Image (cartoon, grey):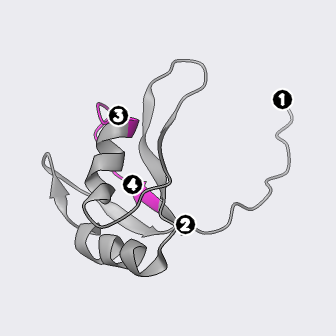
Amino acid sequence: MRIYVGNLKYAVTDDQLRDMFAEFGDVASADVIKDKFSGQSKGFGFVDMPNASEANDAIQALNDAMQDGRKLTVNEARPRTERPPRHH
């Protein structure tokens, strides 16, 4: 299951994101989304957990949890919709 994690501190790394979810089960991948030009975190990321019940446990435990003074938003990621290309 792909999980969206929002309202992360900009200092959170992929490894820290993985560790946050690893206590609930197997984590296939954890990626903090970064601006492709500046490399700055965008404050959200995605975690892939192959076991749906472990993923649901993590979502239940971590959604609205406080981390470093910020309330996390954690839910099942919606499928990415293809956005039309922006014209400059």
Q: Nearer the viewer, mark 3 or mark 4?
A: 3
Q: Where does residue 11 sit, x and y in percent of width and height? A: 29, 30
- Residue at 47% x, 73% y: name it: 51
Check disc 1 and report its element: helix, strand or loop: loop
Q: Where does residue 81 sit, x and y in percent of width and height? A: 75, 62
N-term mark: 3 or 4: 4
The residue under label 1 is 88
C-alpha span from label 1 to label 4: 28 Å
Name above or below for residue 38 compared with residue 85.
Answer: above
Q: Which mark is residue 77?
A: 2
In magenta segment, residue 70? no
- Judge whether residue 81 can be spotted in this image: yes
Q: Residue 16 falls in which quadrant of the image?
A: top left
N-term mark: 1 or 2: 2
The residue under label 3 is 13
Comparing 40 with 46, the one in front is: 46
In magenta segment, residue 10? yes
Mark 1 near mark 4, Cβ–Cβ under 8 Å? no
- Under mark 2, the amino acid is Ala
Q: Nearer the viewer, mark 3 or mark 2?
A: 3
Q: Residue furthest left?
A: 69
Count of marks placed on residues:
4
Determine crowd level at label 1: few under 14, some 14-19, many 20+ residues with C-alpha closer than 10 A.
Answer: few
Instruction: Read off the magenta span.
Output: 4-14
N-term mark: 2 or 4: 4
C-alpha span from label 3 to label 2: 19 Å
Q: Where does residue 38 sit, x and y in percent of width and height? A: 52, 18
